[in-house]
Image (cartoon, coloured by chain):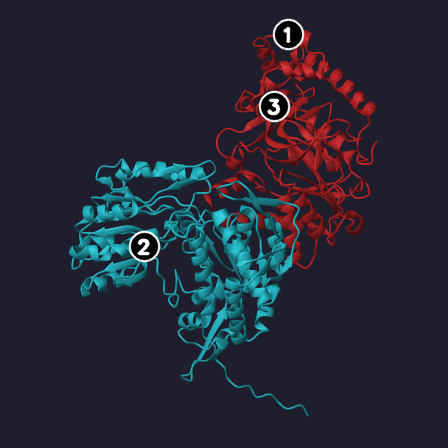
Chain colours: A cyan, B red
Amino acid sequence: MITLNPLRWGKQYKSLEFQNVFHFDTGESIAKIGQVNGGMVQMDMRKADNARKVLREIPTQELIARCKKAAHMFEHETLPVGDSQQTVADFIHQQSASTGLPEHMCRNNMQKNCFVLSNIDKILDALTRGLDLEIFARGYGEEGRNVTVSYQCQTPVLGAVLPNNSPGVHTLWLPAVPLQVGLVLKPGSQEPWTPYRMISAYIEAGIPAEAFCLYPGGHDVGGMIMSKCSRSMIFGSAQTVEQYSGNPRVQAHGPGFSKILIGDDVVDQWEDYLDLMVESVLSNSGRSCINCSGIWASRHTKEIGEALASRMGGIDILPPSDSKAALAAFTNPQMAKGTWSMVQQDLAEQGVVDMTASYGQRLIEQERCAYLKPMVVTADSPQRAVAMKEYMFPFVSVVKCPQKEMIKSIGPTLVGTALTADDQWIDELTAATHIDRLNIGPMPTSRLNWLQPHEGNLIDFLFRSRAYQIVPMKIAQPV
Amino acid sequence: MTATTPAWLATDIQIADAKKELDQHTYESVQWHFHESTGCPFWLEKKAELKFDPLKEVNSFDDLKKFPEFEDECLRGGPIERWIPNGLRNKPTYVFETGGTTGIPKSRMVIDDFRIDYENFSHTLPDEYFPKGSNWLMLGPSGPRRLRLAIEHLCQYRGGICFCIDLDPRWVIKLIKKGWMEHLEEYKKHCIDQAITILTANHNIKCMFTTPKLLESLAAGLAEKGTSIQEIGITGIFSGGTEFTPQWTRFCVEELLGGPVEESGVYMTPTYGNTLMGLACSRPVTIDDGYTIAYYAPQPRAVVEVVDFDDHTKIVGHGETGRVKLYTMTKEFFVPGFMERDEGERELPFHKYPWDGVSGVRPYRGFASSTTVGVY
C-alpha cells in the first residue's frame, strides 16, 4: 500500500493522521493519505512569495522545456510518488480503483494532461495572443508597436481545491508553472493520483520543489487555501459556483450543462449527427462538465431520443480493466441511489418520457459500489425540470423547443455545439453570454481545442493588464 | 508492572479507592436530588415516573444504570427555576446557555459549580507556566456562556485579572451555514485584532484560554506582525475542543508554540468539557505518547464512560471505540447518564486520575455530518 504524504513547499510532511483510500469494488485499502489542517496551510502561506521567487529564477523558455520533460515523465516513466516508485500501470490501476473510472478512461485522461503540458508553449502563445512570455516574467515589456505593456502577476501561487471524481480537470492548473506561479493544491480524497504524480514529474524534470504544496485534508484545508491564495480555483456543485460568483479571486468550476443545439436548417438530417451526439453524452462515462446533458431541437425529438436510446440503452457494465468498458462506478453507492431518486422525480413530470425504459434496470447496486446505466429522456418543452439537469453518468434530455426560443431557454451552457449554417442564428449564438465555449458545426461537446481558453483565460485570472510608463532617469555621476 | 505497561498507569489500590469514593458520592448525590427538602422540581417530578425508588435503590454508581438516559432536550425552555434544588433556593443563580443559533437554547442553572470545577482544575495547572498573580486573556466565546465567567474566575482564583474579547459563536455558525466565508474571515480577524490589541498593550498577560481554531489564527496574526505566542510572553495556554487530534496538537506544539515546552517555555493543556459536565483534564501530552490526548472526568463530580454504539449500558473494552456517556453529580445538577455527541477510545486509568478516560474524542459518527464543530 502506498503512503502519500503532504508536501509543504516541496518537503514531505509525515502526518500523524491518515485517510485510507479503498478499491471501489474489492474494498481493499490501496493507499493512505497523510492529512493536514487549515492552520498549517495558513502558516505555510506566509512563505508563498518564495514559490514565485524560485520560479522566476528560471527563464520562461527553460521552464517550458522542463514542463515538456515533465509531460513525458508523467506519461511514460516510473516516478517517486509518496513512499513508493509508481509505474504508469500502477498509476492507472490506482486511479481506476479509487474513482471507479475504467482504466482506458484513466489512460485517456492521463494522455490529455500530458498533451496539454507537452504543448504548453503553443497553449501559452494562444492564451497570451502571442505576447513574449518574458513580459509576464518581468512584469512589463515592449509589445512590438513601440508601446510598453505591463502584466502584473496577482498572486505568487495558484490555489486549487481539486475534485474527487474527474481526473480530466487537472489541465486547468498545469499552465501556472511556466507562468512562474507556484501551486498550492488540495487533492481530492479519491483522486490524489494526478496531482501527486504531476508534481513529482515537475520536480523530477527540474522545477524547484519549493514551488509546490500538496495539502490533503478536510474542508478547513480547502477553505484556508481559498482564503489565503489571492487566486484559486475550486471544483464543486452549482451551489459552489454560485457562492463564488463575481469573486475575482476565485475561478469556480461546476456542472457544465453542455448542450447540442440543432438548427431548423439541419434538423431533418439529425441522423447524420448521431455519432457526434453519442460521443458527447458517453465519453468519460458522462462525468465531465463538457459531456452533453441536453440536445435541443424543434422537431424529431422523439426519433432522436429513440435512436440515442438504441445506441446507449444496452450498454452494459464491464470490468474496469476491459478496454470496452464505457461506464464508471459510483464508488459511493448512496450517491447513485440519490441520483436515481432525483431522476425518478424528473420522470414523474408530464411531458417527460424515458426512452431507455425498455432497456432494463438503470440502477445496478453491487456490494460496495453502484452503477447507473445510460439514460435518454425526451421533454416536450424547455419548461420541464429535466431540461436543466445534469447528472454524473451518461444522461441526456432531448428537449423540444422552437429555434427562436432556444437561446433564451437553454440556461447556462459551458459547451454549446450548434449544428447549423444559419448565419443569423450563429450571430445570435455568438452574442449569447450564457454560452461559454461555442462550437459552430459538428464538433462533439467533449472535444476541446486546448489553444482556446476554458471557463475564462488563465492569463486574465493570474495577471492584470495595467499602465506602465517609463521615462529615462538622469542620474548624476558620483564625483 | 510489565515492560509494556505505561508508567502513568494507576495502581489497583488507587483505582479501588476512587471507585469507593464514587459509590459514596453517588449515594449522597441521589439522596440530595431526590429528597423532597433538597431536590429540584424537575427530578422530584421525574421520581414519580421511575419504576424504582432512587432513595432506596441507588447505593452505588452502577445503580445509576437504573435511570433512563437523560435527554438534554428537556433543558430547552423554562421555567429555569424547576432546576434549582430546594436545598439551594434563594442563592444568587446564573443561567448558562449552549446552542441557540436557531431556536431555544439549552439552559443550565448554576450557582457555584463553575467556580468549584475551575478551582479544582486550577490545582492541576503547573505554576511554572501558569504563574500565580499573572493576568489572563480569555480568547473564546462571550455572552451567555459558562466559559466566559469560568475562565475569569479561574484567573481571579489564581490572583490575576482576566481580559476578554467579544465573540458571538451563534453569529459564527450562522455565517458558516449561510456560506458567507468572507464575512467569517473578517469576523475571525475582528476577534484576533481584539486579542492582539490586548496582548500588545503591556498588561503582563502570561496565560490564556483559547480554542484550537483561534489559537491558529492568533499565531498567524502575530506572525504577520513579526512576533509569536512565545515572544509575546504567553507561557500557559488552556484550550478545549474536539479538534484536539494528536496531529493538530503536534502541529500546534511544533509550529505555533515554538516546540516542546522544555524548549519553548510555552505549556498547553487540552481539556474536554461542556456546560453539563464541567471540565475533564488531559494526561500530559508528549511526543513519546504519540501526542495522544486522553481526558479524565473530574470524578466523583462527573464521570465519563465509553459505551457501545448500540447498547449504551455496555462499556467497551480498553482501547476500543464507543460513544461518550456523561454523568454529572453535583449539589446543583444531576445527570444520570447522558449520551454526548462525541465518540472516542476508552483509556486506562491514570495515576493522577485513577479511573477510565477517553481519547481521540471526535464528533459521533452518527451525527458528524450534521454537526458544526470547531467554529471559533
Q: Residues within 10 Å of mark 1 (few under 14, many from 20)?
A: few
Question: Is A205 rendered above or below residue A263?
Answer: below
- Residue A442, x across and y down, in percent: 26, 61
- Within 10 Å of the Cα at label 2, are there few (<14), some (14-19), or many (20+) other Cα atoms? many
Residue occupying the point 65% across, 21% down? B333
Q: Are marks 1 and 3 in contact (CB under 8 Å)?
A: no
The chain letter for the residue carrying disc 3 is: B
What's under tag 3, amino acid-wise? Phe
Residue B327 at what x, y percent from top left?
66, 23
- Taking the view exactly as shown, the residue that stands out farthest to the bottom is A479
Q: Secondary structure at mark 3?
A: strand
Location of residue A188 in the rendering, given as x and y in whole percent from the top left corner: 51, 50
- Within 10 Å of the Cα at label 3, are there few (<14), some (14-19), or many (20+) other Cα atoms? many
Q: Which residue is mark 1?
A: B53
Chain of the residue under the numbered disc 1 shown in the image: B
Left or right for A158, reference A342: right
Q: CA distance from mark 2 to mark 1?
A: 73 Å
Quadrant of the rendered image containing residue B290: top right
Instruction: Give the labeled residue for mark 2.
Output: A280
Mark 3 — residue? B338
Disc 3 to disc 2, C-alpha distance = 56 Å
Closer to us: mark 2 or mark 1? 2
Label 2 residue SS: helix
User: Can see residue A258?
Assistant: no
Mark 2 belongs to chain:
A
Q: Identity of the amino acid at label 2?
A: Ser
**Quadrant (top left/top right/bottom left/bottom right) for the N terminus of chain B:** top right
